[in-house]
Image (cartoon, rainbow, N blue to C red):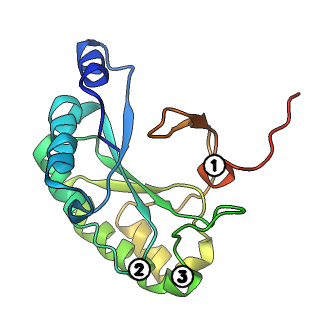
Amino acid sequence: NGLLPDTVLDYLCSRDDNRIGLILNVNEPDQYSTSEWKQVERTLQALGNRIVLGFNLYREDCDFNFILDLHKRFKTQQHVRFGMAQPILGMDNQFLPTEAFPLIADKLVKAACEWTPQGLYFAFDCGFPFCMFTLDQHAELLRCGINFRNNCSPIVDIGTDLRVWRCFPLEHTPRRGI
């Protein structure tokens, strides 16, 4: 989330190789306190070219247009990871209801058409159903250089308390050993 302790940020900055990359999930700037947003910007300034920006959709009135500005200002990687907040089994959490899918699909297609000519592309993380988009919207995404692909791939989620897990929505499900 970009709110790294100084020791962690200093360590990442001290690595002179580019094998360390981060997906930095950002919320809309107004979701942060002033000091938190300054820390996010500090992280972006320090690690910009190693960062892939991410944005999790969890409400229909979201505005992710600030991402293009962050990309330009901090020279982040040329693609954004869009995630969709899912209901968490056994918990009460915010997630995008299916009724909001058409509105979000429109926003994503619009972003694709505006961002790709400026060199910023995005990919869909797991959870996006193909039917969320009309066939015309799929064609428009392709025309704008966005290939709809929906699959889960191995990645480690790290919580603010430094716990790790494979899939955030399944964090509280029982685990089995081999």
Depth check, front residue: 74 or 164: 164
Q: Which mark is residue 152?
A: 1
Q: CA distance from mark 2 to mark 1?
A: 23 Å
x 61%, y 72%: residue: 130
52 to 7, vertically: above or below: below
Give the amino acid at mark 2.
Glu
Q: Residues within 10 Å of mark 3 (few under 14, many from 20)?
A: few
Q: CA distance from mark 1 to mark 3?
A: 23 Å
Q: What residue is disc 2 on? A: 60
Q: What residue is disc 3 on? A: 135
Give the amino acid at mark 1.
Cys
Q: Which mark is residue 131?
A: none
Left or right of 19 in this view: 30: left
Depth check, front residue: 107 or 9: 9
x and y, in percent, of residue 141 in the image: 41, 70
**Pair 1/3: label in front:** 1
x 61%, y 42%: residue: 153
Element carrying mark 1: loop
x and y, in percent, of residue 89 in the image: 71, 62
Among numbered discs 2 and 1, the one appearing first in the sequence: 2
Q: CA distance from mark 2 to mark 3?
A: 21 Å
Depth check, front residue: 50 or 137: 50
Among numbered discs 2 and 3, the one appearing first in the sequence: 2
x 62%, y 70%: residue: 129
The N terminus appears in which quarter of the rendering?
top left
The C terminus appears in which quarter of the rendering?
top right
Q: Residues within 10 Å of mark 2 (few under 14, many from 20)?
A: some
Give the amino acid at mark 3.
Leu
Element carrying mark 2: loop
**Pair 2/3: label in front:** 2
Depth check, front residue: 130 or 178: 178
